[in-house]
Amino acid sequence: MASALVIGGTGFIGRHAVENLLGHDYDVTSVSRSAPAFPFTDPTAVEHVTGDRTDQSTLETLAAGRDPDVVVDCAAFFPQDVESAVEVFADVDAYVYVSSGGVYSRQEIPKREDDTPLHECSPEQATDETMASYGPRKAEGDRVARSAATRGVAAMSVRPCVLYGPRSMQSQSITPTDASPTWMDGMPVNQTLHDYWIERVDRFDRVVVPGDGTALWHRAYAADVADAIRTVAERGEPGEAYNVGDQRVCTLEDVIGLVADTLGTSVDVVHASRRELARVGLAPDDFILYHHPMTGYPHVLETCKIRSLGWGSTPAEDAMARTVTERIDHLRNRDETAPNRDAETRLLDAIAE
């Protein structure tokens, strides 16, 4: 039986990676700074080690004690993290660094692994802990992995776009005016994105959508990202990076429609121009999933490369149904109402006049 070590195995993508590897007959060890907040499907099948991956001696102990065939690194947020890992795990069959779709410096549609330039990363950015340097830090991690491959290390990268799916780390919603959401892979974490629209569709007959509803923000279903990680570990080429995202790139209005279909309801989408929104103190970028919050530009990744390895994504209808089904009870049982509805109500009333 092949063995796998998942660094950051109790996080959102890490948990999905652990479950996917278990489902494909791997002997799995998970390491993170804290014990799992929620049990794995089969807790007895997963060995969990509490440790800090930024302490190289922790990685060295894991390498010596577990001798893994595959290492999945879901918790490398600084270039030094990747540098330590490719040194300690230089002899594994595959080291897969979970990078980000936020590594690309040029805004184009789609962003391609081998053509679209990556962010540069200055020495100051390499150690900076703010989200302003997230893309550059992740990009530098990609370069570290590629460089390690030239030395014979089987290091590869996966670059997911915005994440969503069951078993989110987050239980709260963020409001459209929240300036500091929780981030992962260069984007606000999945359920903080989708909870907002799930609540809107569940609670109201009409929702405001900025523009014409065709805003594009490529998403990646978490279970599919986990499957991509394993696929790259088994079939990927050392030194290569692989974008990961849903085959269907949904518009904002598509997402709303998928939520409504799952809930067995319907909702009237009211399109509002920038001028109309300004009348009630709103702007298009205030709305979740309108555009990438750091660039204001559609975020779409090309995924032909990962598909050439035999990987495929879950149909958007199924992925959203599973996501909504997990979240809806929590959202309906909360004491608070859907956030920031007052301004939208004023706009809806004004448009109806």
Image: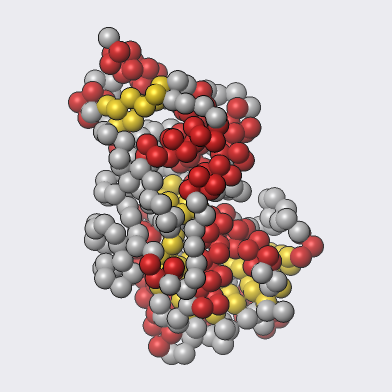
> Is residue 132 at least partly visible in the picture?
yes
Based on the displayed image, in which of its 4 quarters is residue 18 positioned?
Answer: bottom right
> Is residue 84 at least partly visible in the picture?
no
Residue 298 % position (x, y): 29, 49
15 versus 215 height, above or below: below
Residue placed most toward the observer, 219 or 287: 219
Q: Is residue 243 left or right of residue 325?
A: left
Toward the right, the furthest residue is 44
110 versus 4 height, above or below: above
313 versus 231 height, above or below: above
Residue placed most toward the observer, 85 or 26: 26
- Residue drawn at (29%, 59%) of the image: 110
Colour convention of the picture: secondary structure
- Residue drawn at (51%, 34%) of the image: 261
Toward the bottom, the furthest residue is 151
Q: Is residue 225 left or right of residue 167?
A: left
Residue placed most toward the observer, 32 or 229: 229
- Residue drawn at (56%, 42%) of the image: 321
How many numbered marks appear? 0
Image quarter hosting the N terminus: bottom right
- Residue drawn at (58%, 84%) of the image: 92
Residue 264 % position (x, y): 55, 30
Image quarter hosting the C terminus: top left
Residue 87 % position (x, y): 51, 83
Residue 195 % position (x, y): 50, 36
